[in-house]
Structures are given as C-alpha cells and as structure tokens.
Image: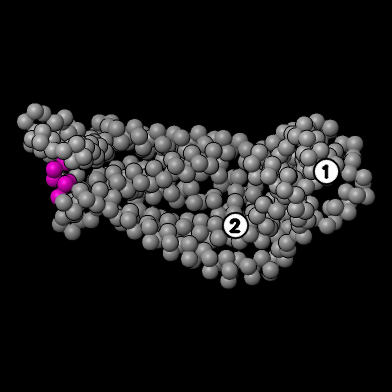
Amino acid sequence: MAAVLAEGGLERLAGAAGPPAQPRAGWPGALAFSGAPPRAHRALLGNRMLQTLYDYFWWERLWLPVNLTWADLEDRDGRVYAKASDLYITLPLALLFLIIRYFFELYVATPLASLLNVKEKTRLRAPPNPTLEHFYLTSGKQPKQVEVELLSRQSGFSGRQVERWFRRRRNQDRPSLLKKFREASWRFTFYLIAFIAGMAVIVDKPWFYDMKKVWEGYPIQDFKEQIIHHVATIILISFSWFANYIRAGTLIMALHDSSDYLLESAKMFNYAGWKNTCNNIFIVFAIVFIITRLVILPFWILHCTVVYPLELYPAFFGYYFFNSMMGVLQMLHIFWAYLILRMAHKFITGKLVEDERSDREETESSEGDEAAAGGVAKSRTLANGHLILNNHHKND
C-alpha cells in the first residue's frame, strides 16, 4: 500500500474497472521475454506475477463499495483519511511496548506482588536422568501406563518414581506464580488504559449513541478458540483501517476492552491468594462479558454493520468479508460465554474444584503429605500427576 501511495498508484487503481487483464500478444513485456536469457525470463515473469497479484489484492472492488474509488480516500481540503501506510507505526510501537512492559513488570508489578504477599512455592526438581529426559523432550510429557512401565525398566526407577519424575519435570517448565502475576498485572493495566482511552475518544461522538450515524458521510474523516480469535481480531482491525471503517472498528475495540481488564484483575487476586475477591470480580466480569458480547455486539454493532450499510450502497466483497469475521468472533463469544457461565455457577454454588487435567504443583509440603498418606487415597488416587476423582481417570 505504501508503494501505491508513493508512486501515485491510487489513481491507476481508481481508474481500473476490474482486476488487471491478462497480458496479450502485444504486451510490451512479451518482446523482452522473446530475446531474454532463461534466468532473466524467469525474473521478468516472476515480477509480472507479483505485480498482478499486487494489483488484484488492491483492486478497489474488494475493499470499497461500487460508488467509491481509492481516489476518494486521498487527503484533500483539509480532510485526512486513514491509510494502510499509517500501520507502519505499529512496528516501532510494538518495540516500545515491549520496553515499557519490561520496566513495568520490574518496577511496578514486582513490588505490587510483594505488597499482596504473592509468594513462590518451593518446587522439587526432577533428578537428572538421561533416559527420562530424552523421552520427555522427544516423545511427550505425559507417558501412558505402558510407557511408564517401559521407562521404569530402562531407567532403574520404580513406576511410582517415574510418575513423580515426570510430574516434577512438568512443574519445572510451568511459569512461576510471580511470573504469572506480573503478566496479569501488565495485561490488566494495558486493557484498563485502552478501555478508558477508547471511551474518552468516542463517548462524545453522536454515532456512539446512534448506530446509523456510523455510516453517515462514508468514507469518514476520523483520527484514529485463542488463535482464531486473535487472527479474526487482527483482520477486523486492519480491514477497518484499510477501508475506513473507523467508527465501526473503534466501537468493536472499545466493547472488547470493557471486560478484559476485569478478568486480568481477577487473575491477579487469584495469584495473591485472595480467593473471595477473585471470585467476586470474576462474577462481575461474567456479567459484563455477557452483556457486551452476547447482547450489545450482536444486536447493536453487528446489526449496524450488516443492515445499515446496505441502505447506502450495494453489498461488495469487503462487506461480506468484514461481517464474516464478525460472525467468527460472535461464535467464539458464545462458546466462551458457555465456559464462563459454567465456571461462575461453580463459584456461586461452591462446587469449584481444581481441574483434574492440570498437573499438581509438588512442593516440599506436598511431598511430605504424600509420604504420610502412602501416596494412595480411595477417591483421590494420584497417577502420573493427575487427580482421579471417583477412581475414573481422565486423560489430558
């Protein structure tokens, strides 16, 4: 996009009625190919293919309604529009945020952890054993019972010792409590500031209260599961900027920021051992999440992006693409809401127990307790780091 802006490519794209046509016999490049050596031939062909793909990608019919061209988004008469090249600023900003995060965790989150009495547990380290270490690194961290018996013969350990070794080795790779607290503190601070800043920018705008005004005067003059969610979010944010869906994009971002900081604060209090405070904040988070992502998003914002644009211009590729990404996010929100409500119900009824799929943190005290109990309990048998409830083992 930067090259298009720098080389006046917007005018060229604006005049295109469709994707670039395929080269004809009279295409000037054909003469160059005829007498060019094979290597130059391949280079010219490769450049032409890249240019064709580039032109297809920035074809205005993919990004803009039929009544708009890239020329309409050029700055003029004091009006400034969002441009793809503006996103280059995100690269130095990302580096800046990494630096800020480092000093925040060092000089803010660490003292805060000490103030809240976040303490590290003493972890027992797995004794060196080349056989078990090789299996751990190459075959898996959760050996099955047959593999435990084989490793027992190969290592000279008993089956129980093999299970304990893998449990300790997994604990070594888990992030420390202090590290998790620092990360949650940073995310809480970032999300809270992002939400406050976002609301400060849009709360006085008329389209914050009337969704139809999101599309008035378009194109608009404005200043600016987990992997699937991030990809869809990045695509939505990028497309909103490219196609000048600035108002819709800011509403979506503000809505998502409204609950994230609550979840991170609940994590902070959980790591600090303030269980009741953690549970109460989580309940508030669940309520805000349900209202914003299962009520406001589908019935206000999604309705705004699906219905109102069709009153101004015919549907085009970008319209379908943007709303399909919104649909992906909405499906993820429904799935997460189910998990959140199930956990909130356990908080309220007092039935929340530790996830039987997670490794138990083995400390000096837990080792002593295990020895005293003989390592066996009728309804809490410990097998390879897993708690078995009611004697029914659940695999990871």
Q: Which of marks 2 and 1 is in front?
A: 1
Q: Is residue 50 magenta?
A: no
Residue 22 occupies quadrant: top left
* Quadrant of residue 110 within the rendered picture: bottom right
Instruction: Tell me which numbered mark, 2 or 1, is placed earlier along the sequence.
Output: 1
How many C-alpha atoms fall within 10 Å of the one at disc 2: few (<14), some, or many (≥20)? many
In the picture, measured across the screen, residue 150 lies left or right of residue 327, that is right
Q: Can you tell which quarter of the image residue 78 is in?
A: bottom left
| Residue 77, x across and y down, in percent | 15, 57
Residue under the point 19% across and 44% down: 70
Which residue sits at x=63%, y=59%?
179
Q: Is residue 9 highlighted in magenta?
A: yes
Main secondary structure of the magenta stretch: helix
What are the residue bounds of the magenta stretch? Answer: 8-14
Q: Nearer the viewer, residue 133 or 85?
A: 133
Name the disc covering residue 184, or none. 2
Residue 101, image x, y percentages: 51, 63
Q: Which of 332 and 17 is in front in this view?
A: 17
Question: Residue under circle 1?
Answer: 156
